[in-house]
Image (cartoon, rainbow, N blue to C red):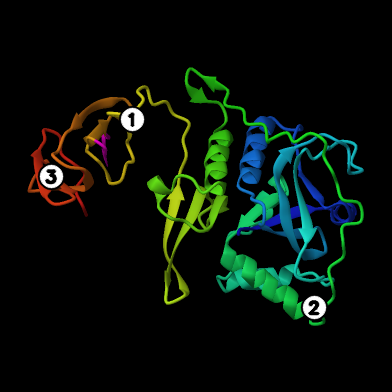
Amino acid sequence: MSYHIFLVGENNFDICIKRGVYGGIHPTDSAKSKQITSEIIASFSGIRVGDFVFFYVKNKGIYGLWKVTHEPFYDTTPIWSDKNQIYPYRICFVPTVRKFSKPIAMNDVLDLRDKGKIWTFDLGPITKKSHNPITSSEGKELIRLLLRNNTIFVKPDEIVQPYSHSVNQPLPLNFEHDKGRLRYEGYLNAWFMSSFAQGKLKELIGDYGDFLNFVPTSFNKVMDIFLTHITTIDSVDILHKFTCMELKTGIVSEDFAEISGEPLAPDGMKVDSEGNVYVTGKGGIWVLNPEGRRLGIITVPELPANLCWGDREWKTLYITARTSIYRVHLNIAGIPVS
């Protein structure tokens, strides 16, 4: 299961825990409102039933612990007292484990950041989007601090007035485009996050554990999507690989999703000195120009797995397959390996 931190004011927090519902903001007061809305929806799209929930209450700290009971949905029914905001992107939840009356102070969170134990939580993005997914290891660190602060077991409170929404309306995804180019990248992100939440795309990405979006970095950039890959050896989970995804809303003019009725399932990828992309997949090596247009396919006798440039002028493409290694001489040089 995944872990999430939600931003909420003190008054609205009381309503949230009494009714077992939380709502994400719907921005309307800036020139980038539509873009931010798409990113908020993308953030909520990765939430699953059973995920764990923390609340960062302004000027108080981080409270826990709750568990999601309903998939994210869209609802405009008034719940909170804010007249300028309806918080329509919502989840329902119930308390779990025990009651943690004393929150985690932000100084403790910052101390964990200094030690490298928490790195995806950032007050800047959560202030703008009200939701911050974190890794499983970070979630466990927060639970450890809650247990430290609340040493006596207290049974969790029940939801006083459980919220029941009459219309089960999914999150609104807007794939509006301009001549094939999506207007807002956030909705592409939402599609990926929803797919990961359903356990899809493993044939493309491989098995994955955590999947987060809009992850801050130390060099003032944001990773669009970040995934962890875990291998279990002798009942011990070992984190052995990360995947970082950079999304773009460019146009691919040809459908390379299928060839001979089978999915492309790309694996290895290389780029030549003119910016053309070489991708292994069903049928051979697909060659795409920098705009995404297919230039052709280099066929090989069996399913290719990976490729690399070689020889003195870097104009030879070496291709590994299931049982053999193939070599193709090309007119365009690849990018040398430094």
Residue 159 circle label? none
Disc 3/disc 2 C-alpha distance (Å): 63 Å
Q: Which quarter of the picture shows residue 114? A: bottom right
- Position of residue 306 in the picture relative to residue 169 (left or right): left
Above or below, 47 relative to 253: below
Q: Secondary structure at mark 3?
A: loop
Upstream in sequence: badge 3 or badge 2? 2
Q: Amino acid at mark 1?
A: Glu
Q: Secondary structure at mark 1?
A: strand
Residue identifier under label 1:
258
Upstream in sequence: badge 1 or badge 2? 2
Residue identifier under label 3:
314
- Position of residue 257 in the picture relative to residue 46 (left or right): left
Q: Amino acid at mark 2?
A: Asn
The x, y position of residue 303, in whole percent, is 21, 43
Q: Secondary structure at mark 2?
A: loop
At label 3, counting other C-alpha atoms closer than 10 Å, the crowd grade (few under 14, some 14-19, many 20 or more) is: many
Q: Which residues are magenta?
A: 275-282
> Residue lying farthest bottom?
151
Disc 1/disc 2 C-alpha distance (Å): 55 Å
In reply to whether residue 36 is colored magenta, the answer given is no
In reply to whether residue 281 is colored magenta, the answer given is yes
Residue 150 circle label? 2
Nearest the eye: 97 or 33:
97
Q: Nearer the viewer, mark 3 or mark 1?
A: 1
Q: Main secondary structure of the magenta part?
A: strand
**Label 3 with label 1: CB-CB less than 8 Å:** no
